[in-house]
Amino acid sequence: MPVSVTPYIPTYITVHMGTPTSNAENVTVPFQDYIKNVASSEIYPTWNYSALRANILAQVSFALNRVYTEYYPSRGYNFNITASTAYDQKFIKGRNFFDSVSELVDELFDDYIRRQGYVEPLSARFCNGTTSQCDGLSQWGSEALAQEGYTSVEILKNYYGPDIELVVNAPVQDIQYSYPGTPMRLGDRSGDIRIAQFALNRIAQAYPAIPKISSVDGIFGPETEASVRAFQSIFNLAVDGVIGKGTWYAIFRLYSGILQLSELVSEGQTFPQLNFDYNSYQTYGPEQISLLQYLLSVLSQFYTTIPFVSIDGIYGDQTRQAVRALQQDAGLPQTGVVDEATWNALVDRFLSIDRTVLSTTDIFPFTAVDHLTPVEIQESLATRPDQFPGHPLEYGQSD
């Protein structure tokens, strides 16, 4: 859901083996294998290393954008992406993978491109650059630039603009579809209602006939019902004032369309738009717990004292232990309960990591490894220190 969930890498992805409306089979494969298939089908393994890296990052980002925006499920389809190059990326069922491509995908499948300050993976469109032209990356053009000495990041910035950044080591989890499972109606309260209220207010900027909701508070009151009814009337849905599955996905299909989240040029979903408000997370519903678990899972990659948390929407022993570890790190009472101080400590740490680590090529300099082989990269990583160096690190030092 674009207004509440930060991106992740799906464990599996379902591919429709034709155009969206065709009567073709669906194939569900591990996401890594999907990217290996696409990369082996779209590009040549003999290309320059930096061109291969740039193309694979574009392929990962495009696929993740389809998952993040629920592009096809929101339109009523039971798949995540198609194998049609007219709509998506080439996927050939049962094909073999090139060894060099496979090694690179193992390294890059959980990295993706986004615009600076945006949440969603970039809809990194591309074309071959010879028989077809597009606004995104030219595959043969990327190889030409690589031969001129361009690094993968320089190639990507050449085609997608200087304001892109790379997110690395994104968490991996099963696909979570946004619809909460039960209709929402007058008198209900939930974090999902708050999400719908936020989206409806954004849609109302483009469609003034939809009345604004004065308080985005997760309470399904008369204003929310009036907004839902107006939305349903405008977009030819049954006007019942209830947010069922059809209305839910219609809201967020239009929300994504207005922000152009599935386009190369997008208004973008920014972090301030994400639902990090503590007051909306006191009900401990599955959606709230899933976001809590996601944030904890990111922190666990950078704080050795915080154990990894599976994202299942259940506040069990694993989640409670991670919360206690966070509280200990923050100097808070170790209750295992997320009060406001704990929530603020969690969000502050997450946003700090995102700003200073996940999205900066100064700290993760992809350009430095463009001209190394996969074996040389592994040897380089094996010699990198991953523990305290034995002396304090202070302002002004370089190492």
Image (spheres, rainbow, N blue to C red):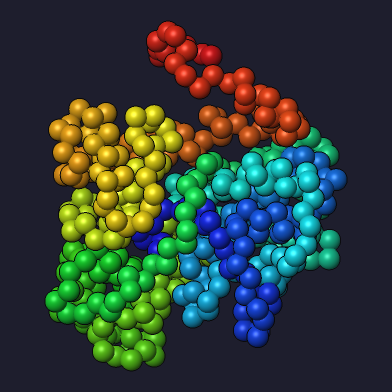
* Location of residue 371 in the rendering, given as x and y in whole percent from the top left corner: 75, 31
* Location of residue 274 in the rendering, given as x and y in whole percent from the top left corner: 34, 54
Asked if residue 53 lies left or right of residue 221, the reply is right
* Location of residue 81 in the rendering, given as x and y in whole percent from the top left corner: 60, 69
**Above/below status of 326 relative to 284:** above
**Above/below status of 257 relative to 183:** above
Q: Is residue 12 visible?
A: yes
Q: Residue at x 29, y 90 (%)?
A: 239
Quarter holding the N terminus? bottom left
**Above/below status of 309 relative to 74:** above
Q: Nearer the viewer, residue 271 or 369?
A: 369
Asked if residue 99 lies left or right of residue 115, the reply is right
* Location of residue 236 in the rendering, given as x and y in whole percent from the top left corner: 39, 90
Q: Nearer the viewer, residue 118 or 329?
A: 329
In the image, farthest residue toward the top: 391
Q: Nearer the viewer, residue 306 or 317?
A: 317
In the image, farthest residue toward the front: 317
Q: Residue at x 27, y 46 (%)?
A: 317
Figure label count: 0
Asked if residue 362 lies left or right of residue 328, the reply is right
Q: Residue at x 56, y 32 (%)?
A: 364
Q: Is residue 19 visible?
A: no
Q: Residue at x 42, y 63 (%)?
A: 176
Residue 287 lies in quadrant: bottom left
